[in-house]
Amino acid sequence: MFNPDKYRSVKWQKGGRAYPLLDCFGIVNEIRRDLGLPEWPDFAGVTKTAGALDREARKLMLSLKRCDPCEGAGVACYSGSTVFPCRDRCNAR
């Protein structure tokens, strides 16, 4: 059973992929593991620099299909035609 309280102990760490030290994408895969879903690619070392995040996100999205909201579904945030971390856009407001 999914226990959201587990994530209150997470400490943010850039590039974090091992619980409890996770970054935003690390927590996505931690949740997917806890839900019994397959993990997404690790994206180790991928940053927004030189469009790397956009490029790698687009590659991943080629293997995904659009669905209604459900456990394990993800979201892609765009500005124009560029994928960016949703938190960056939200924090800018």
Image (cartoon, rainbow, N blue to C red):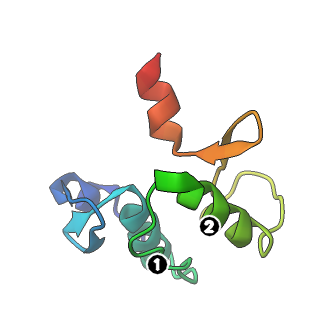
Residues packed near mark 1 inside 10 Å, few (<14), some (14 to 19) or many (20 plus): few
Q: Is residue 66 left or right of residue 36?
A: right
Quarter-of-image position of residue 54 = bottom right
What residue did someone put label 2 on? 56
Q: Nearer the viewer, mark 1 or mark 2?
A: 2
Q: Residue type at mark 1?
A: Asp
Quadrant assignment for the N terminus: bottom left
Q: Is residue 24 above or below residue 15?
A: above
Q: Are marks 1 and 2 in contact (CB under 8 Å)?
A: no
Q: Residue type at mark 2?
A: Glu
Q: Which residue is at the front of the view, 58 or 17?
A: 58
Q: Residue 52's mark?
A: none
Q: Which residue: 72% across, 62% down?
A: 58
Q: Is residue 2 above or below residue 87?
A: below
Quarter-of-image position of residue 82 = top right
What residue did someone put label 1 on? 42
Q: Is residue 64 left or right of residue 44?
A: right
Q: First in sequence, mark 1 or 2: give its number.
A: 1
- State the separation of the CA atoms marked 1 and 2: 11 Å
Q: Is residue 4 left or right of residue 42?
A: left
Q: Position of residue 35 (x, y in %)?
A: 50, 74
Quarter-of-image position of residue 14 = bottom left
Q: Position of residue 36 (x, y in %)?
A: 52, 82
Q: Position of residue 17 (x, y in %)?
A: 31, 74
Q: How many marks?
A: 2
Q: Which residue: 16% across, 57% down?
A: 9
